[in-house]
Amino acid sequence: MPAFGQSIPHDSAPGHVTGGAPYVEDLPPLHGELWVDFAGAPVAAGRLRSVDAGEALAYPGVVAVYTHHDLPPGGVNKFGPIFHDEPFLVEDEVSYVGQPIALIAAETRDAARRARGLVQFEIEEAEPILTIEQALTAESFLGPERCVARGDLDAAFAEAPHTLDGVFINNGQEQFYLESQACQCIPGEGRELKFISSTQNPTETQAVAAEVLGLTMHQVVCECKRMGGGFGGKETQSAIPALMVGLVSQKTGRPSRVVYRKDDDMLITGKRHPYRSTYRAAFDGDGRLRGVELDFVSDGGAFADLSTSIMERTLLHADNAYHLPAVSITGRICKTNLPPNTAFRGFGGPQGVVVIENILQEIAQTLGLDALDVRRRNLYVDGDPEKSVTPYGQIVRDHVLHETFDQLEQTSDYRARMKRTEAFNAESRTHVKGLALTAIKFGISFTTKFLNQGNALVNVYTDGTVQVSTGGTEMGQGLNTKIRQLVADEFGLLPQDVVLMTTSTEKNHNTSPTAASAGTDLNGTAAVNACREIKARMAAFAAKQFESPERGLVYSPENVVFEDGTVYDDRHPESRFPFGQLCDLARRDRIDLGARGFYATPGVDFNRETGRGNPFFYYTTGAAAAEVTIDRFTGDLVVDRVDLLMDVGKMINPGIDRGQIVGGFIQGMGWVTTEELKVDASGRLLSVSPTTYKIPNITDLPRVFNADTIVNPKHQINVRQSKAVGEPPLMLGVAPWLAVKHAMSFINPDAIAKLELPATNEQNLMCMTALLNREKAEVELG
Amino acid sequence: MRDHLVFYLNGQRRTAAGPEALATLTDYLRERRRLVGTKVVCAEGDCGACSVLVGRPADDGSATLAYHTIDACIAFMYQLDRAHVVTIEGLAEDSRLSAVQDAMVKCHGSQCGFCTPGFVVTMHGLLEDPGRADHVTSAVSGNGRANGSPVQPLPQLTEDKLRLGLSGNLCRCTGYQQILDAGAAIDSAAVVTMNQRFPARPVLDDFAALGDEPVRIETELRGVPRTVFLPQTLDQAAAFRAEFPGKQSAVASGTTDLGVQHTHGRHDPSAVLSLTSVSGLDRVAIEDGVLVTGATASWTRIERAVERVVPEYHAVLTRFGSPQIRNAGTIAGNLANASPIADSIPFHMVMDAELDLINPRGARVVKLNDFYLGYKQLDLAEDELIAAVRTPLPTAGQHLKLYKVSKRRDMDISTFTAAVLLTLDDAGETITAARLAFGGVAPVVLRLPETESLLAGQPFTKDTMRAAGQHARTEITPISDVRGGADYRLQLAENILVKCYHDLRPEPVPA
């Protein structure tokens, strides 16, 4: 039986449930290993005048305190995935609260922790820029403004019977991986360093460590066995802890380890970008869009990190699943005195998607139409010469968006529940309900072309077992389990005959981060390609064994089949080799049973100067219906019911895909409901632990929760016709926010609620109060 | 006097002395014992990744240990004398997965795996839960207890039980659905309870052989002399408190707050008075309409005791901290911690609770309404201890409503709390007396005397309650902080009385 399509458990599940699967912090201490901690900037902006480490150095157990002065000759105190603009340790300018200035290396974790409070800084404080508004006033930006546009927007607005405009505010979101940033460094021979890192990006860690520490890439190895969650937060920013231990091990010659404390991690690492998005829409009486103008402004934080790529994805997802006839989309990134914001599942997509969904919701309220009808009228139409073309020129093809809406409308009982919602709101004095059905169309591929590549190493052993190594990293998403299934099927083996090995730059080099939902697409295809090379050699060898002039069987590798742990010639299937036996024989015949596979996604490219191109290999699509109830007196929000329907292609592992769909949705729901980042007037983040930052709890899981997939026979590409599933469902999480917006329309039907994101209980109550006061004020005026 | 701790860890007898007695349980497990399956994420008791089971001699005469799940990151070793700690490593028998572990694997209950040990341990805790008989849907055949008591069928865990029972564990990957699936799929016939896995008798005999002498550990940590004292009686406790009054000693019971202070470097006491071993101090009883709770009664015990008699209080308690926090945290700790957003205080204030205090000079009683003198300032002498809390329960004609508003429904600290106690006349038309206590609106939980008198004698109508709400705004001085803005809190204070009206006079809910 093929492994494809089976819901086999995560390959680390037995280790997870017994506590036997180690993370960086769990690895046994090595002889002489040091603990590393850091002292960060106490203010958000200023000039560092001096560092006094005397007291810290005197603390029992402290071995060394290092600053940027301790970087080796040839080292560069700058890094960054796109622009090299971020110092590893503060030299002169302080850019955000907590920014690392000094490293403390000590014999024990406790000593390092206690000594860090003894490092004294002299800082000349400056006025920080802490909001998008302040940055706009100061014209403080990162990177250039980007634009995607088509059609005659002025004409569209001049001719359309209706228009609306507004400003959409979304807050950021903490990745909240449970395992904090962590890295161990082991010095090797000469100047070699080996990093055991919790990272989505071993190659980048290797490259950054080499550059900053004055090494060459071939002196550095980075490994990652598993992460306790990543969600984008360990795509670039995992390099910083690696540099910390790298410098300590380089200077002391001893192994070292750093594990961020949760509140440090939340204080100093970047998050999902807050945006301030200005919008204007022109539309028909039936809700069809004629023109849309969108100006996105994000808070990039103090350094560029991935902000330009993230904004690019916002521009490319501002259409979401809807055809925008005339459109202008611009994006600017503000530079502020906050930690550099970074990747987080969705990567700018959510900030684009939610704005257009909000516009359609507002159009429905303005025209008194059902929002689902409005959305449906604007959906991309497969095969339509106009209504299938995105603003950037890529054709949206082979999708089932209309079928998804149709099916979800039925299975979620949307029409009847909309009637019940209206009836409820007409009667209830204590609660108000809302219902919204939203879509997602998410482009799969890195929008930076060169990253769309992967490589894999497959070793077949003479007992018929297989080890696979790829550049992909396992952060819980089940990448290794899916590749296990793909490889098992290639050789006709059971999944347990295949093991995924620790990711290491020694085995797989020049790799891309495990990101953009493309981990399985890139690394899985590379692994399959490696298997096919090995199989071709084995088939040629096997064909020689099956060749039999007496039986009229000529030499024919094409007839060799790998199935059920055996290898046979399909013209004479009774005679079979057990797979392992054939491997052993092949080796004795000097056949190479290992291969390195490579894959580059075909046909993708995007010109960011012109805003035109085909950045995506395909799209993953879906829809969500969410119903919410809000307490009119407290603003308390409950998400009562959610129905999800997604096209994720043919599933390699439905159990894992279901986990991605549900988990992604709930994470998105957290972004739009309870997850609120609060920064004080000095620029210090206040919500730095789960005590004050509230991700969804198990009791927030909607009581009625249906997650299903839809078959799409038109999707014929990608590895075994699967689709990427990691990020897209997160953006279905905006449905509860739109349901809140819908609920607000019942508080005062004549006013569009100025609802920000997240719709916290506080936001809901204050929004309702404002709507009621406005109603009152208008009544008094009338 | 014993000078070391005696406890069991995954069935093995262990002792701890010296500075080890002051370590957190997670530091001990991970660093001293290299049991690294127990994960630390927040070190504040707010995620459950560090959940472990702690068994103590059951008080139902059953010769078993009663196991509860706690957050090990904010527990200290000195609390674990005469206890059995079971970690994730203690659950799989001979490398065979437990029924819970097996279900979690099969149902895709883990993704990144970092929260998973905590969930597995907590699920095991739910299967231990002595209150489980109240929550069963169906009784499936089960195992007999190792001690030979009658075969007790183990229940399947219901969705409600799982949701509330796991609300102290955060997961960022799964969205929880597949964890719930796993909980529902646990093969109850294959569940091995802790008393089956680890025979209780030898442990109990060993603990009994320790006798009833207190434990006193004199040691040194980071160059500072330290004393840890575990009294067996309240008198011993009072004597020690007199020896180390005020800030000279930390009074520890559940340590759900001290543990957090420790994480943040704000708790480094030279002497600790741990009340966990004082016998009988955790009793909970309802006597003549008065809820009597000993100082170290855990919230879990109180929650069970009031479930039928004051369902309104019970409902708020189910949202107090998390199950792990309620298993450890105690009533005296919550009242003495004096947080303006403590979930228990408003109820006890409107019910006019009294505190029994003891000191070397004797005993005295203070009303809770007089206990708070200012932010974290108490009418409690430096050598005084809270012994018990006596809280009259609502009588006929008294209508109690309790509110907790927080950013997230469960495992969250309140933004605003309110207790409303209205006495209505026989017809239910007129308010004869009103007591209001609001939290999160001032440095202490506040009674609202003006609004209370405004309500007295008024007809019980929406207009009355609205006017009272508007007046309540003038009696409070909320601040803006990470949990909410001052405007929001003012609006809540105004609205909550109207909400209370609707709750007491419900209209038919539309279908």
Image (tube, grey):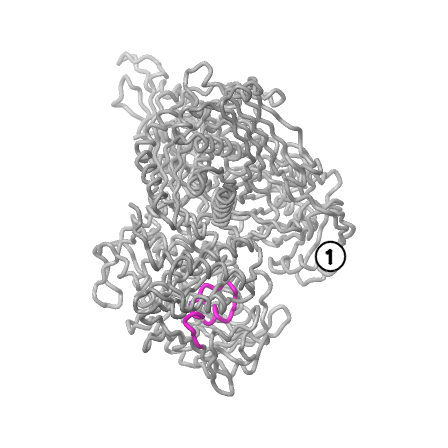
Query: Which residue is drawn at the image coordinates 63% and 52% (left, top)?
Result: A36
Name, please, the residue furthest toward the right.
A49
Left/right placement of residue B144 relative to residue A392 reads left
Q: Which of A686 and A571 is in front in this view?
A: A686
| In the image, farthest residue toward the bottom | B361
Q: Can residue B413 be seen in this view?
A: no
Residue B114 x/y as whole percent: 46, 49
| Element class at badge 1 | strand
Closer to us: A654 or A624: A624
Q: Is residue A490 above or below residue A200?
A: above
Q: Could you tell me which chain the residue with mark 1 belongs to?
A: A
Q: Position of residue A324 (x, y in %)?
A: 50, 22
- Residue A731, above or below B272: above
Segment colored magenta = B332-354
Mark 1 belongs to which amino acid? Answer: Gln
Pointer 1: what residue?
A120
- Residue that appears at 30% across and 72% down: B60
Q: Please state the horizontal and vertical placement of residue B173, each as a whole percent of the image.
A: 44, 43
- Residue B328: x and y, percent? 43, 65
Quadrant of the drawing holding the N terminus of chain A: top left
Q: Which residue is more in the foreground, A527 or A560?
A: A527
Q: Residue at x 53, y 72 (%)?
A: B372
Residue A132 is covered by the magenta coloring = no
